[in-house]
Image (cartoon, helix red, strand yellow):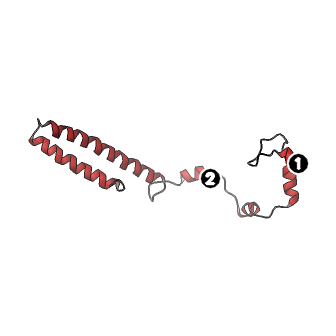
Amino acid sequence: DKGNLHANVVWFREELDKLQSDLDNDPSNVSIQEKEAAAVVSFNEALLMEKKFLKQKGFLGQPGTTTNFIVNDLFPIKLNDNEALKMVRDISNQEVKSAMFSMGSDKSPGPNGFTAAFFKES
């Protein structure tokens, strides 16, 4: 089961324990030695995957594992209510025209492929 990382770690640990016990009983058995070596690799891989998952889970803000300073560093400037309302207000045609003509005519084209010069001449 690849979905439950902790269950994988437990399962691989149990398999490794069984193989190591078998190896203690028959130390010269090459087949068991090879299986034990493969089980060590599988166990370590499962352990590493679980560790990476837990690290990512902690980073993503599970309670008690992440501090607020990370979020505050991402968004250091906050708008007050008045500034926020200005961001969603209606825009006049004059504001659009003023913004358009304040741009340099040789600026790179927008997503439609036209430069500011095209719109200024229209």
Residue type beneath disc 2: Phe
Counting from the top left corner in percent of width and height, residue 65 is at 44, 54
Counting from the top left corner in percent of width and height, residue 89 is at 77, 64
Q: In this picture, is 37 found above or below 56?
A: above
- SS state under label 2: loop
Residue type beneath disc 1: Lys
CA separation, marks 2 and 1?
A: 36 Å
Q: Residue at (21%, 46%) from the top-left corner?
A: 16
Name the foreground residue: 76 vs 106.
Answer: 106
Residue at numbered disc 2 = 75
Q: Horizontally, is 10 left or right of 74 in the view?
A: left
Q: Residue at (35%, 53%) from the top-left corner?
A: 2
> Farthest residue in the right direction?
121
Please tell me how crowded label 1 is: few (under 14), some (14-19), or many (20+) other residues with Cα within 10 Å: few
Counting from the top left corner in percent of width and height, residue 85 is at 74, 64
> What mark, if any, has residue 120 been given in the picture?
1
Mark 2 or mark 1: which comes first in sequence? 2
Quarter placement of the N terminus:
bottom left
Q: Horizontally, is 121 left or right of 18 in the view?
A: right
Q: Horizontally, is 92 left or right of 68 in the view?
A: right
